[in-house]
Image (tube, coloured by chain):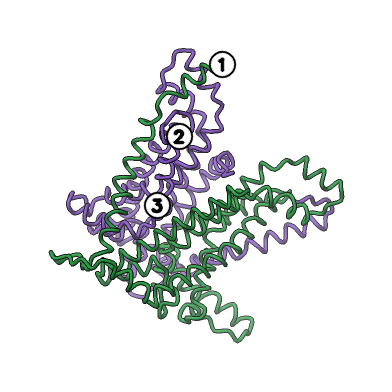
Chain colours: A purple, B green
Amino acid sequence: MFEVRSKKNKILLQLILFVMTIPYLIPLVQMVLGSLGGRGLYNYKVVWDTGVVPIYFRNSAIIAVGVIALVYAFSMTAGFGFAKLHIKGKEFYFWMILIALTLPEVILLTPLFVTFQKLHMYNTLFAVILPTAALQLPFTILLARKFNEGIPGELMEAARIDGANIWQVFTQVILPMTKPIASAIIVLTLINAWNAYLLPLLFLQSPNLQVVTLLPQYFQGEFTNDQTKILAAAVMTAIPEIIAYLLMQKNFEKGMIAGALK
Amino acid sequence: MKDKKMKSSTYISGLPWILPALLFLVVIVYYSIISTFNLSTLDWNGLDPIRTSVGMKNFVKMIHDRVFWLCLKNTVIYFAITFVVQNTLGFLFAAILHSQVKLSTLHKCIIFIPTILAPATMAPVFRLLFSPQGMLQSVFNALHLPITVDWLANPNTALFVLMAVAIWEFTGMSFILYYAAMSQVDKQILEAARIDGAGNIRTLITMVLPHCKGTTVSLAMLGIIGALKTFDIPYLITTGGPNHATEFLGTYIYRQGIRQSHLGYAAALSVALLVLAIGGALASNYSKKGD
């Protein structure tokens, strides 16, 4: 966007970028430095030796996979339906879904608590997976619909003429073409599912059902006020997230560009 | 001929395609909304078999509740400042990273990593960073600046610390959306403007910014809803304190409903929150249509 020709301006722009980025690094530096305070890397060993880290990670991973599967299936089918097929009262249904975008999870707590207890789902991973997916869906359906609207109808028609039924059109034409938005949806859903805090805090009670966002709290109980261990746990939680993001960064960027909200 | 064929498949009913998502949302979301409305007319602690119906009493209590208005005030300040700062930064980052700069992927990652890290993971870090034991204090000490960092304990500064945290966390989102919007700017038009003598800053403000208006409106909508929904950051860093200075509707509903078992009152606050969020979303959507 900026056109810089002279060497002086090029260096200046680079310098501005560096200065603007530094504040974003400060908390990360504090996290790492803090985790190495006192006995250094030994803090990490103490945290690891408690044995809870792999359990918390496993539960977060199960929740993330469950939420992504639901969100992917529901957003892809609904995005296609809303964008490409005939539905009576379409915009009404769409608004019904969009209104859910405004819903804070704190509102869900009491009604879901009562229901999950009745259905014996309280203190199971489903109690986190289902509402987390529901809260994620409005935004991902919006993204999927916008993206599907950009796919030319002729492609669908060509497949229809070749004798494909609507399901085959969906799986053979639409799904391959919606890959960019699908990867953006998956990354966004992964972030939200992995970072979910309130629902796991209230709906998961057993020690073997806890998730990564509850690790700092666990260690606060375990090592009262020993900040270094708590921060070591934070670093251990952050690293896999950062690695996952770096691996998907290119796809995610492509997806966001493709699905840019206009 | 072609038109007729087009119709044949657009007239396949799409209802079965949207029904799974719709039913899922109705069962979880709409059920909860209706149940919250119902709860808001009760005086109930969640355990008693007796639920006393109190009509509109919870709402009357809310209107006279100083903390409720404080939550709204905090939300407005929080939205206004984070919206402006976060989106200005996101816009500038996007513009700079669309220019010819080195190490652009590294910068993109540093800006976006805060967005992917859970507030729950980062909360202990921020509590340390903004305390007298933190890194900022060491820097001020090393520079011999007479500043004491205990900004989270001070009711006048705590809210600003939380805003800084929110800006740190969500700039990545603004950045990526602006970055995406800017990749659709017609380079030739910018070139033409430059040939006409427009400078970088002027091109950015008069041509690129209007092009990104849709993104700005979407970000405003997400920002309003996000500010109203704010929970993790204040709850985990200050638990709404000191003395409600960082109380938001989300943390207050939690305090009333979960901590103190005033389920009816918490539900009334939830209804207010929901009405405000839907109102905010409709208002920003209306401004989009007004183009």
Looking at the image, the residue that sits furthest to the left is: B49
Which SS class for mark 1?
Answer: helix
Residue B16 image label:
none
Residue position marked by numbered label 2 in the rendering: A82
Q: Chain of mark 3?
A: A
Residue position marked by numbered label 1 in the rendering: B2
**Place of residue A133 in the rendered image (x, y in percent of width and height, measured from the top left):** 36, 46
Residue position marked by numbered label 3 in the rendering: A194
Label 1, label 3: how far apart the Cα atoms are: 47 Å
Residue plotted at (17% across, 65% down): B51
Label 1, label 2: how far apart the Cα atoms are: 22 Å
**Place of residue A118 in the rendered image (x, y in percent of width and height, measured from the top left):** 17, 52
Looking at the image, the residue that sits furthest to the bottom is: B146
Which SS class for mark 3?
Answer: helix
Residue plotted at (57% across, 38% down): A258
Q: Horizontal placement of B25 versus A206: left or right?
A: right
- Nearer to us of marks 1 and 3 is 1
Residue plotted at (40% across, 55% down): A195
Q: Chain of mark 1?
A: B
Instruction: Look at label 1 and name its amino acid.
Output: Lys
Label 3, label 2: how far apart the Cα atoms are: 28 Å
Tell me: residue B93, above or below residue B7.
Answer: below
